[in-house]
Amino acid sequence: MANSGKNFYSPAAHGFVRIACATPNVHIADPRANLSEHVQLAHKADAAGADVVLFPELSLTGYTLEDLFLQQTLQQAAKAALEVLITASQDWRAIVVCGVPLWIEGALYNCAAVIQGGALLGLVPKTFLPNYREFYEKRWFASGHALNTELEIGGVSAPVTTHQVFQAQGDAAFTLGVEICEDMWSPDTPSTRLALAGATVIVNLSASPVTVGKSRVRKRICEATSERLMCAYAFSASGPGESTTDLAWDGQSLVYELGTLLAEGERFASDTLTLADIDVERIAQERLRTATFADARRFSAKEPVQTCLFDHKPHALTDFYRTVDRFPYVPNDRDRLDEDCFEAFNIQVHGLMRRIESTQSESVVIGVSGGLDSTHALIVACKAFDRLGRPRSQIRGYTMPGFGTTSGSKSDAHKLMRALGVTAEEIDIRPASKRMLMDIGHPYGQGELVYDVVFENVQAGLRTDFLFRLAGQHRGFVVGTGDLSELALGWCTYGVGDHMSHYNVNCGAPKTLIQHLIRWAARTEFDAKAARVLRSVLEREISPELVPVQNGQAQRTEDKVGPYPLQDFTLYYLTRFGLKPSKIAFLQYQAWKDATAGDWPPDYPQADRRAYGIADIRKWMEVFLFRFFTISQFKRSAVPNGPKLISGGALSPRGDWRAPSDSTATLWLDELRTNLPSE
């Protein structure tokens, strides 16, 4: 296990905070009965490892009491129930956030009580009181906007203010902010101030009567809030048991993180818990990487927000209330995948169109191997020429068989070029390659079957030499085919081959996305004849085809650099969020441990749906880290122009990734080996 003594398989060991949105059955104007509901649900949530348990607005009394809120008997019963709940909380490690009306300094306030370990940490009054259409809250409550005082409950005073956050002692990444219902609907939300004060998790106790379509509106607001404020946002609305005199209640529960829905509870149900694991470390990293967040904090003229520290004892449970996609670059939903493919393909096409126009080129030159990358670059070029109103014959495709070229890939290359109507030619590079190997005194030139890096690079270099000279001869430029994944792994020969071109349309495309781009283009952009050839390319093994077939087995790229699904996963979380290798490995394990669990991208081949265990993950992540940090950056520092495609980032030194070429992987490898179990 990890040297730190933490359980690697527990999400709490990797910076995840578990939240539970509770939907109790409401008992109108009966705090004692509501207290019983709270105790049962909080106990259940605590046993499930919840760090925060969120109840709806005014949950200890019910929201639909109207003028009953002004009854002294109700007010005293609510306060008494709160005192009992505080005492009960000493048996739980979780923070409990519940709703209660409280008489404070001569006015009644709609409050959120934040409780933990037998203590009331603080009270947060509601700022914005709706007083329109069906709402009349100003009839009973005062706004807590300017309130900054203390209230004694159970012999202990607690702060009462909207200007406070609750922070785990020793872990600033876990900081809780609270707002109530209408607060999130206002133009100037309290959550903005709370996030700028450090709150990474913001909870909303809500009543929110349901009408047709309102659930969608709530989701849009919660999603946008979590993305704009770079936080997690949890929402819990009142459910069954509230009065239905004029309104109805659905008990909607939502948890979002950085714009992504983590969990959604069953609506129109009660006595339920909606659990989600929130990555507060990732939120903190995202804020660190986004300078505008720090600027907003400095520029804010709001009054200071006080911080209340609380003890946080992470659970050791190994269940995980969060879905981790196997392919972070590829959506599992068909509609979203189609939209992503449409955008990515058109970004590539329009990038190439602009370069053709600006260079006034008469042609483009592409090396066509019959593999995924060159196939995709070729179809991008075809669409670029179509939209420019220029004949595809000005696209010059060259297939250049070498010592490892198989008949299948060569045949596919010719079929593809014919089907697309481009100018197709073949140049056999074997004679020139053998001549060069002889001239430099390589063993292969003397008849020895030595297939080393030099043997491979001679072929890659000659192909590039031919393409660049051909581009000059035909007054055009070379369109690159190398992809983002190859660049991350350094799986290219410096200055030639997949590394070098005049303009690389694939530089922002990860390998795991390219197959879907081709499949989408075959379905939507090309005729049936071309589509058949494109689909046949998808069935071919990924190979550089530089070494002759041996014992019936062609050269396999993934035997050397690792499975692209795992390597693209690591690339995404390492470069996009800067996560530690051991945490990436934990997420990778959750995504890939069971091939039968969870969703796969549409049309992903059944034969390729496999699982990976910790041993596989460790092995190939070590390969990735070594190649990425130690031997590849100098190649990334000298890449040609090409468009960024995905929010996950690109590796151009002029864009998302800038790093020294002289670094090593030691720090990252040590972190992985220290914190990853051996099996």
Image (cartoon, rainbow, N blue to C red):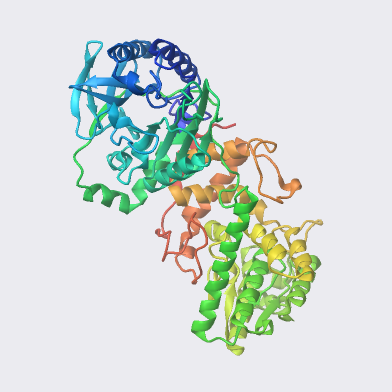
Question: Residue 27 at what x, y percent from top left?
Answer: 45, 16
Q: Is residue 196 left or right of residue 3?
A: left
- Residue 113 sits in quarter: top left
Quadrant of the rendering where the C terminus is positioned: top right
- Residue 191 sits in quarter: top left
Question: Residue 108 at what x, y percent from top left?
Answer: 25, 23
Observer able to see residue 511: no
Q: Residue at x 57, y 63 (%)?
A: 344
Q: Is residue 333 left or right of residue 430?
A: left
Question: Residue 622 at what x, y percent from top left?
Answer: 54, 45
Q: Residue at x 55, y 56 (%)?
A: 489
Q: Is residue 623 above or below residue 453?
A: above
Question: Residue 125 at what x, y percent from top left?
Answer: 28, 29
- Residue 454 sits in quarter: bottom right
Q: Is residue 545 above or below residue 667?
A: below
Q: Is residue 649 left or right of residue 169?
A: right
In the rendered picture of this protein, how many numbered marks are placed on residues?
0
The residue nearer to you, when weighing 176 against 537, is 176
Q: Residue at x 58, y 85 (%)?
A: 476
Observer able to see residue 600: yes
The residue nearer to you, when weighing 114 against 563, is 114
The residue nearer to you, when weighing 502 against 449, is 502
The residue nearer to you, when weighing 80 against 494, is 80
